[in-house]
Amino acid sequence: MSGFNSEELENPTEILEEYRKTGDLELRNLLVMHYSYIARAVASQMRGITSTYAQMEDIVNQGILTLIDCIERFEPGKGVKFEAYAFMRIKNANIDFVRKQDWLPRRVRKAARDITEAHDALSNQLLREPTSKELAQHMGISEEAVNKHYSEISNSVLLSFEMLLQNAAPGTESSADEESLPEMRLMQQELREQLMEAIDSLTERERLVISLYYKERLKFYEIAQVMGVSESRISQTHSRAILKMRRRLEQYMKG
């Protein structure tokens, strides 16, 4: 094995260069073991986005497969650190993997898109939040159908927003591996900024519902009592807010 052993991974760059010369699979295995913390760190940091669609173990395994491909393809002469290269490749591969696992029924996904488009159009036209009755008239369906769509959207857990809040919150516990990877700290900072922008894009009523539900831990019926409206209206406001934030955060993840 060209004289290398696991104790000599203090200089993994040297082993990586040796592997490129020899193609020794034992060297590659050493590198995979050494850099596997990147796959675990990315999976841990993205768990708020991926947990709805796949188990953590599946995400880590996907990351390891991408890591192996990174080791095969990495070109040291281009001036990019292997850690940064692997981080971005694994992050993008995880996003692609999650998209393929998306179990959300097509009917519910279409309903979410239709309601969002109708809401945006009416909001611009009326210069205020449309009611369920107005949405129903605009969409040519019954008010009961609109309420059913909102219920299905909410129950489908389109986005694990609570986990995202935990991941992006200052002081979130991180492993030593995560803390040692600058790219992970940058990703957390970017995610926090995107979440703040997503929340700022909501209406005052939507922000209040999100705050009472996720920060104050009130139930929908309790929020309804506080705000003096029906519980179904709170559920609709919550679903609409989640749809807006999901759309903004998806744009960030795809970008």
Image: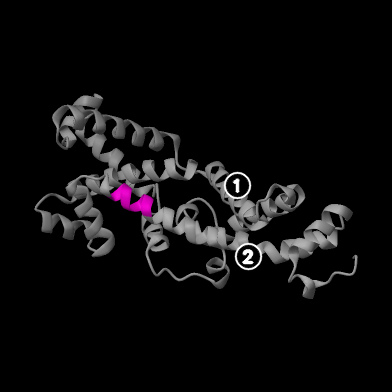
Q: Label for residue 137?
A: none
Name above or below for residue 108 compared with residue 97: above
Q: Amino acid at mark 1?
A: Ala
Quick one: label 2 or label 1, which is nearer the N terminus? 2
Q: Can you give x and y, in whole percent of width and height, for residue 190 in the image?
A: 43, 53
Element type at mark 2: helix
Mark 1 secondary-structure assignment: helix
Residue 62 seen from this side = no
Residue count near mark 2 (Cα–Cα under 10 Å), binned few <14, some 14–19, many ≥20: some
- Quickly name the residue at label 2: 37
Residue placed most toward the observer, 17 or 103: 17
103 vs 90, left or right, is: left
The span picked out in magenta is: 193-199
- Residue at x-position 60% and y-position 47%: 93
Is 187 on the left-hand or right-hand side of 8?
left
Judge whether residue 8 is colored magenta: no
Res. 116 visible in picture: yes
Give the x, y percent position of residue 33.
72, 65
**Is 181 on the left or on the right of 35, as rendered?**
left
Instruction: Say which residue appears at 50% left-offset and 43% top-offset.
Output: 102
**Quadrant of the rendered structure where residue 96 is?**
top right
Q: Which residue is mark 1?
A: 93
Q: How far, Cα to Cα, is label 2 from label 1?
A: 16 Å
Q: Is residue 71 above or below residue 244?
A: below
Q: How is the image coloured?
A: one colour
Q: Is residue 151 above or below residue 81?
A: above
